[in-house]
Amino acid sequence: MMMREATPEERRIFYKEEWNKREIPDFILHSLSLREFGFDLDGTGPSHRYNQFITVEQLENFMRNRAPYSAFASVALYERPSAREGWLKSELVLDIDAKDLPIRSCSCPPGKVCERCIDDARKVAMEFAETLSGDLDLHNIHFVYSGRGFHVRVTDESVMGLEQNERGQIVEYVTGGVVPTDITMALGYSKVFRERAARTFNALNEERLLGIRGLRKTVIQRLMCEKERALKAIRDGKLDEIFSFEGMSQKTFCSLLGFLARINSGFADGKVTIDTKRILRLPSSLHSGVSMKCTLVRDIEHFKLESAVPKFVRERNDEK
């Protein structure tokens, strides 16, 4: 599917004929007047900030009249959103951007996305949500297709009051971004890390592994030849099995784990998670850079990109 920038006329058509306030998720509607709204009106960036809407009808009038290039709402709730003062709490957010994934199954050039890498991002979002629910006992988890990836937005009260440091620890836990002190523990973070490390290792080729300091080429070639055995050893945390590979010392193995952890941390933008005043694309709005609709995803497992294609794009394609 061709993703290109929407014209000003196409934006006007979208907001006049297709945009619907009923597609704004309830978790935003129910706190609408407590959120800061920001807009990019002409494609130069979200410089139109500090907006507050008391009613959804006020927001509707703005969207239809201004047809913004991009529309955003804060993850934070404020006493005075128009001044960004009186912080109350913020959603916990994981931002998975397809163009920034450290490992992609497609061959997109840097900064570009396609259906295949967006599906890669969808699978990562599902994986992270399973950890948030299963390990951290969080349940109010919402998925939003953002145009180039997915936002996982958590509204459980237990996390909305967290500070930056605590949010940073959560994103490290979910992504597997830090090597655990004991990789052999059966449950908890050690298990999460092993799963993430195995997934990442499975996707790497010999050339990528050559970037690990201290890992000799002969060891890498052995790992590649016996990849299934190496993967099982990593998943199970069986150090004796891992060290049975010729040339794999404890120091070398630590270098390998550190390398995998650094890649793991790149599957989500940690800066977004810790920023309690971040604004995110408003579900229902148009991502004009790719002519796709940002939308709440009710069934992430079966999400298809076609559900986010605006009518004007379909008509544009029909004319070709």
Image (tube, rainbow, N blue to C red):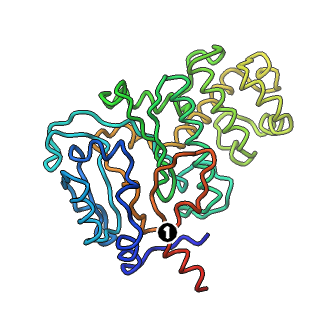
Where is the N terminus found, in terms of image quarters?
bottom right
Q: Is residue 267 left or right of residue 271?
A: right
Residue ID at (35%, 73%): 16
Residue ID at (46%, 46%): 151
Residue 128 percent coordinates (x, y)? 55, 35
Q: Nearer the viewer, residue 179 or 7?
A: 7
Element class at badge 1: loop
Residue ID at (49%, 69%): 310
Residue 159 percent coordinates (x, y)? 36, 27
Residue 312 percent coordinates (x, y)? 48, 76
Q: Amino acid at mark 1?
A: Pro
Q: Is residue 46 left or right of residue 53?
A: right
Classify residue 118 by image quadrant. bottom right
Figure check: 237 above or below 284: above
Q: Is residue 262 left or right of residue 85?
A: right
Classify residue 47 by image quadrant. bottom left
Pointer 1 residue: 310
Classify residue 261 by image quadrant. top right
Residue 249 percent coordinates (x, y)? 72, 22
Q: Nearer the viewer, residue 163 or 50?
A: 50
Where is the C terminus found, in terms of image quarters?
bottom right
Residue ID at (81%, 37%): 218
